[in-house]
Image (cartoon, rainbow, N blue to C red):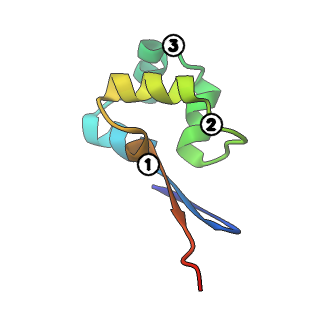
Amino acid sequence: MIKLEIEKGIYLFKLEDILKKKNISINKLMRSTNTDFKVLKRIMTGELVRFDIFVLARLCDYLNCTITDIVEYIPNKRK
């Protein structure tokens, strides 16, 4: 899991964990979901500029999971 802290909270990127748990390679995921390798790597490493809801939908459908299984946002607690 990759943890990315931003000003207002934390993003958790969990795609790599899912792939390991399901024993799926990034190459198989790439071919099966017709998703560019670089896009998958950015999701795995948290180096995204923006989220593509169509890519996330394809990944969720293929992996039989929800978006929050792949990426989760946890806001900072307000004081």
The mark closer to the camera, 1 or 2, is 2
Query: In front: mark 2 or mark 3?
Result: 2
Per the model, the C-alpha gap separating discs 2 and 3 is 16 Å
* Image quarter of residue 63: top left
- The residue closer to the viewer here, 20 or 67, is 67
Image x and y of residue 46, in percent: 61, 48
Q: Which three-letter amino acid code belongs to the residue tagged 2?
A: Phe
Q: Earlier in the sequence, mark 2 or mark 3?
A: 3
Does dot 2 land on a helix, a strand or a loop? loop
Task: Tell me if 21 is positioned left or right of 14 in this view.
Answer: left
Query: Which residue: 43% across, 39% down?
Result: 67
Residue 34: mark in rendering: 3
Q: Earlier in the sequence, mark 1 or mark 2?
A: 1
Identify the residue at image location x=56%, y=40%. Answer: 43
Q: Which residue occupies 62% across, 39% down?
A: 42
Q: Secondary structure at mark 3?
A: loop
In the picture, the disc for residue 55 is: none
Alpha carbon of mark 1 to alpha carbon of mark 2: how far? Answer: 14 Å
Residue at 34 percent across and 41 percent down: it is: 18
- The 10 Å Cα crowd at callout 2, few under 14, some 14 to 19, many 20 or more, is few
Q: Amino acid at mark 1?
A: Lys
Q: Which residue position holds label 2?
A: 51
- The extreme front residue here reads 79
The quadrant of the image that shows the N terminus is bottom left
